[in-house]
Image (tube, rainbow, N blue to C red):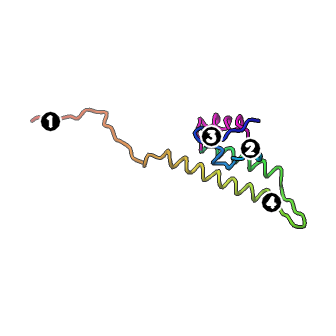
Amino acid sequence: MAFTYDLSEDVGKVRLLLNDVDETTMVFDDVEIQAFLDLHDDQVFLAAAQAIDTNADNELLASKVLKTQDLQVDGAKVADSLRARATRLREQWAAEQDDGGFFDIVDSQPAIVDWY
């Protein structure tokens, strides 16, 4: 499994946003992150959000609710927190796409002038 963390590359930027920056504990390899980028037309925020959602699903499926004498893990709460992060990334992306709501009105008919 390949791991790169170069912030000048989109894979590295996605890693930064999903906090998958340590090779020894990586969640996704480079090929998987590139697949998220491919699925979202190289939009870094959307790819990171999808990766976080996928990680949330994995957390929910793997952890469920575990409790021992001194430790409790609630996969659903972790998944909810991860999904909230993914939602914020999508909102950031949408805000960057917003052109301020301005538009131009173009009159396609020539002006008629009366010269009487």
Which residue is tagged 4?
A: 74
Report the number of discs. Answer: 4
- Residue 36 within the magenta-colored segment of the rendering: yes
Q: Earlier in the sequence, mark 1 or mark 3?
A: 3
- Image quarter hosting the C terminus: top left
Mark 3–mark 2 distance (CA, rounded to whole Å)? 12 Å
Mark 4–mark 2 distance (CA, rounded to whole Å)? 25 Å
Q: Depth check: 91 or 5 in front?
A: 5
Which residues are the magenta region? 27-44
Q: Secondary structure at mark 4?
A: strand
Q: Depth check: 108 or 59 in front?
A: 59
In this rendering, which labeled residue sits more in front, label 2 or label 1?
2
Q: Amino acid at mark 3?
A: Asp
Q: Earlier in the sequence, mark 2 or mark 1?
A: 2
Residue drawn at x 42%, y 49% is 100
Kindly indicate the quadrant of the structure image that contains residue 34.
top right
Query: Residue 46, percent across and down?
Result: 61, 43
Residue drawn at x 77%, y 57% is 76
Q: Is 55 situated above or below 66?
A: above
Q: Amino acid at mark 4?
A: Asp
Kindly indicate the quadrant of the structure image that contains residue 13.
top right
Mark 2–mark 1 distance (CA, rounded to whole Å)? 76 Å
Mark 1–mark 3 distance (CA, rounded to whole Å)? 66 Å
Which residue is tagged 3?
A: 6
Query: Are there few (<14), some (14-19), or many (20+) residues within 10 Å of tag 3?
Result: few
In this rendering, which labeled residue sits more in front, label 4 or label 2?
2
Q: Which mark is residue 23?
A: 2
Which residue is tagged 1?
A: 114
Q: Earlier in the sequence, mark 4 or mark 2?
A: 2
Q: Amino acid at mark 2?
A: Glu
